[in-house]
Image (spheres, rainbow, N blue to C red):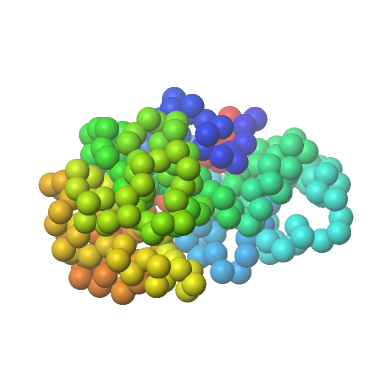
Amino acid sequence: MRSLTRLTDLRADDIYEIFQIADEIAGGKYNGFLNGKSVVLFFPASSIRTRVTFEKGIYLLGGQPILFPGDALDKKEEIRDVCGYLNNWADIVIVRHKSLHLIEKIAQYSKVPVINAMTDRNHPCEILSDLYSLSQIREHFEKDHYLFCGKSGNIGLAWKEAADVLGFDLSQCCTAGYEMEGVSVYHDVKAAVKGKDIICTDSLPAEAMEDFKDCRITKEVMDMANPNALLNPCPPFYRGEEVSDDVIESEYFAGYAFKKNLLAVQQAVMIWCVR
């Protein structure tokens, strides 16, 4: 039994094993893998892509999803006692909650795998899916040069976790005061994209919008990146804010189909954890 709370809990071989499982799912190798198993999910109402793909993935593997709102974990009852009961019935627990510390406590007291479906500090399944999608179209994706354009937050920090495990080059472009620790930082977006292959973004809170007005990714900016560079904005993205409308309509945009693999990767994560 294994849990996934941070990408840095994994080795590179673990990530490649998850990718191999995702490849095998398409061939039907894991049909019925979750037959007779119940997967308890805690998700806020605002979740769309992650929740849909987890619930659909459980259904396609033959399992039973049991859904609760994320704030069901915020009540007075101690989390060790919640886990004590869930251990009787759940086969996997999947949690989307702002607190990574809470998910790590659930993993501590749980006798079944616990999967982090997003916190304020990271988003491991999302980044695994992006890397898997890149692996399908770029032979040496781990040798590409990555740029994260945005503030220090769960998406940027999750990209850093992935870079720490897989060893790829990661830089950040942001306004002063929004830096992540442990990465090279640019404050000029046109300088930042030069020599980069994969440009990733995250949406911005309203209070940071003005600070990032000169860090927006546009088609003109992407034209300065390496040949065959890709733009991979984390959804939800907002045209005219962190990305321009013209770059979303350009050949640089990885596209909606890029996220199609979220289904197979999250199924692969569940299989990897259980087996």
- The residue that appears at 72% across and 63% down in the rendered structure is 71
- The residue that appears at 31% across and 62% down in the rendered structure is 215
- The residue that appears at 22% across and 51% down in the rendered structure is 191
Residues 99 and 69: in front is 99
Residues 209 and 222: in front is 209
User: Could you tell me residue 237's position as x and y percent?
Assistant: 38, 66
Residues 64 and 229: in front is 229
Residues 143 and 15: in front is 143
Q: Quadrant of residue 133?
A: top left
User: Could you tell me residue 226's position as x and y percent?
Assistant: 16, 46
- The residue that appears at 32% across and 50% down in the rendered structure is 186
Q: Quadrant of residue 274?
A: top right
In the displayed structure, would residue 60 be above or below residue 245? above
Q: Is residue 264 visible?
A: no
Q: In the orientation shown, which residue stands out farthest toward the front?
A: 176
User: Could you tell me residue 64's position as x and y percent?
Assistant: 64, 52
Q: Work out which quarter of the rendered image holds the N terminus and state it.
A: top right
Q: Is residue 224 visible?
A: yes
Q: Work out which quarter of the rendered image holds the C terminus and state it.
A: top right
Q: How many marks?
A: 0
Q: Does residue 91 appear left or right of residue 157 in this picture?
A: right
User: Could you tell me residue 222's position as x and y percent?
Assistant: 19, 57
